[in-house]
Amino acid sequence: MDNYQCLPVSAECAREWLKDKGHLDNCKCLELEAQELYLLFSNSLREKEEKLKECQCEESEKVRVSSDYYAWCERCEKDIAVASKKRVIKNRNDVRFWGVSSSYKILCLECIGREFYKRMVGWQRKKWREYRRRGYV
C-alpha cells in the first residue's frame, strides 16, 4: 500500500486489495459505500416522514405560560403568577376549577367573578370570596 497514493476505503476493500494488487487503481468501493449510506439515510427519512404524518401531538391543557413563568388572563390580559417552574397555572385561575365551561382557559379572579359569580354554587362562592380577601384578585 505504500506505493499507492490512497488507502483502502473499508475492510472489504482491503481484502480485495490483498487478492488483487491492482484493485486500488480502479477502486469503486468509496462510490459504493457512499451509495449505501445515501440509501440508508433516505430510507430512514421516509420512515420518519411516514411516522410524522401519523403523529397526533397532544398539548397540556393547563400550559399557557410564557418562558418567564407568567401567564395572562385571556380576557383582560392581566399578568397571573403560575404555580411552579413546571409552567402550570394555579387552580384558582383555571376556569374548570370553578365548574364552568367556557372558551377561556385562564382567567384572573376578577374576570371569573365578573363572568361566573352568579353561576357558582355555595362552596365556590365562599372560596372565591376567600381568594379575594387574601388579595389574589
Image (cartoon, rainbow, N blue to C red):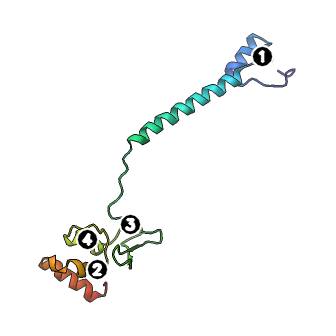
- Residue pointed to by mark 2: 111
User: Quadrant location of residue 62?
Assistant: bottom left
Residue at far top of view: 19
Q: Nearer the viewer, mark 2 or mark 1?
A: 2
Dot 3 or dot 2, earlier in sequence: 3
Q: Residue at x 23, y 70 (%)?
A: 97
Q: Residue at x 78, y 18 (%)?
A: 24
- The circle drawn on residue 26 is 1
Q: Is residue 10 visible?
A: no
Whole-percent x and y of residue 31? Answer: 69, 24
How busy is the neighbourhood of tag 1: few (under 14 within 10 Å), some, or many (20 plus)?
few
Alpha-carbon span between mark 4 and mark 3: 13 Å
- The circle drawn on residue 68 is none
Q: Is disc 4 in contact with disc 3, using a CB cutoff of under 8 Å? A: no
Dot 2 or dot 1, earlier in sequence: 1
Dot 4 or dot 3, earlier in sequence: 3
